[in-house]
Amino acid sequence: MYNIGIDLGGTNIAAAIVAKDGTIIRKDSTPTLGDRDDKLIIKDMAMLALKLIKEEGLSLDDIHSIGVGSPGTPDPEKGLIVYANNLNFKNTPIRDEIRKYIDKPVYIGNDANVAALGEYECGTGVDYKDLVAVTLGTGVGGGIIIDGKIIGGSFNGGAELGHVSIDFNGIQCNCGRKGCWEQYSSATALIRDAKEAAAKNKDSKLNDLVDGDLSKMNAKIPFDAAQAGDKVAGEVIDNYIKHLAVGIVNVINIFQPEIIVLGGGVSAQGDNLINPLRKEIIDEIYGGEPAFKTKVQVAKLGNDAGIIGAAMLYRAYE
Amino acid sequence: MYNIGIDLGGTNIAAAIVAKDGTIIRKDSTPTLGDRDDKLIIKDMAMLALKLIKEEGLSLDDIHSIGVGSPGTPDPEKGLIVYANNLNFKNTPIRDEIRKYIDKPVYIGNDANVAALGEYECGTGVDYKDLVAVTLGTGVGGGIIIDGKIIGGSFNGGAELGHVSIDFNGIQCNCGRKGCWEQYSSATALIRDAKEAAAKNKDSKLNDLVDGDLSKMNAKIPFDAAQAGDKVAGEVIDNYIKHLAVGIVNVINIFQPEIIVLGGGVSAQGDNLINPLRKEIIDEIYGGEPAFKTKVQVAKLGNDAGIIGAAMLYRAYE
């Protein structure tokens, strides 16, 4: 038996037939064309799934369930997408709509939670009974899995770890609060700080690595410059990791999970990120190193976490 | 059938026979004498339970289970108290020790989690499927109950909501971190701020209400002075509530629970606390009032939350 995972994005709908161990058997995608009627988008999701099944030479008897990771606020219980940014979804009955075309159990989840479930079931978290996923990308995303269940809030808008304030007088966040963690620990924040440091320090390697054009700054460049010995970049990275540790220790003090999995663009730094981060965490945690029992590792599944997690949604709800 | 709830404190062991609806049928206590051998303390806990059963004219057949709320770090799965502050407990097999005297299922939990469970099963949280309890006392304690289960961390030291940093450059906490929530929102913090404000403003009512002796300051006085129109006390309270809201909105952004229950000394202020707090939360929450779906109310069970929650532990584990 296989499961279908569907990752509904603003640009593309990606779908795959996924084996129980998380192996992607066949994958394809189609443009979302997000300004269309929600029912047409859902029809395309179902058609993409049916196409994959046919191309793989399978029948519906080989499929156990369909899972969908969606942006915005899904209601997994009612099978709705209550609201999705950039899409005309408003209380869209996605479960019933998909079942018009494919009569199988349909599960839905918020994309960040679903990606966390992917890492939990088939990725870095596979050996652990609970996991918190922290995605360091445009913002800071969160996904919390305890004993195989998604902790997504009673009103399906929880796990917003990026909007935990770590400095109540700090940087203004677009959510209205001040000092949200994502203002310090997202890739966006790192790029902002690297640009500012480069602008202030014309002789920093940061400027060479963007050919003097700060609009070319990305989250990798300050790490590269720091490793090449650039002092200004080193300070940017130290500062970034210090603030990342503040938020991670908050997560540990609340959840004390077996593992925290870091995903998103910045996590590509691997040990360059994890090793200094571990030091900062040990400095900050009550009881120091002996009390630091939570593993902190980078995510394994990359962009496939969403599609694999969607396929595994049945495990969180059955 | 009844359950026995035991609240193991540093000074007293309190125990009660508790009905399934949370009614305390009979209650008694005995001094802990915490510097004794751990096995003697546990023997006294069992003897106190047996005494209550006898005095109430019940037999062991009327008792379903025994639950213990303990300070420090219990391991509910293994039935140990791994470590307890002020007591000589170190990997103490409390479950096995109690069962030497009373052959019934024994459940243990951390006292903050157990008090949260009490409010969830029989107090303010009785109509809700998940709850976060925040205790505003000497420190800020946390207890997280989701779908009837205690979220206490994989290593039984989680739910330390008071040690979420809300200001990474802020007030030094005795846990080693800076800006921990309890440095702003505990009764201790409120008393500290009220003392400082009184010392700086000799004409403030705060000084009258302590008869000029700042060591008499408590958490009620600044509320009383503020309500009597004292401007200095009003600023202390406004500041206190503002910071309390920062931490509460953090909890909402993570858990979005159906209800947050405030306990501890400060919660005795009731609506004087809750009404301005709700305003601050609405100011701070993304989406404002329509997005503020979590109820925020004061705890109902007072000091009995621990004993009632202990008696209800079987529900979290059976």
Image (cartoon, coloured by chain):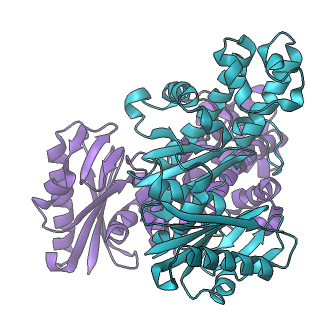
Chain colours: A cyan, B purple
A258 lies above or below A66: above
Residue B314, by quadrant, is: bottom left
Residue A138, by quadrant, is: top right
Image quadrant occupied by the C terminus of chain B: bottom left
x and y, in percent, of residue B94 in the image: 20, 52
Any part of residue A71 in sight: no
Any part of residue A81 in sight: yes
x and y, in percent, of residue A87 in the image: 82, 69
B54 lies above or below B169: below
x and y, in percent, of residue B76 in the image: 30, 55
Q: Nearer the viewer, residue B101 or B197?
A: B101
Q: Nearer the viewer, residue A130 or A298?
A: A298
In the image, what residue occupies the spot 72% across and 42% down?
Answer: A182
A101 lies above or below B64: below
Residue lying at the far left in this picture: please name it.
B100
Q: Nearer the viewer, residue A22 or A188?
A: A22
In the image, what residue occupies the spot 63% across and 81% down?
Answer: A78
Q: Is residue A220 left or right of residue A251?
A: right
Image quadrant occupied by the N terminus of chain B: bottom left
x and y, in percent, of residue B45 in the image: 21, 56
Q: Nearer the viewer, residue A89 or B35?
A: A89
In the image, what residue occupies the spot 75% across and 61% down?
Answer: B275
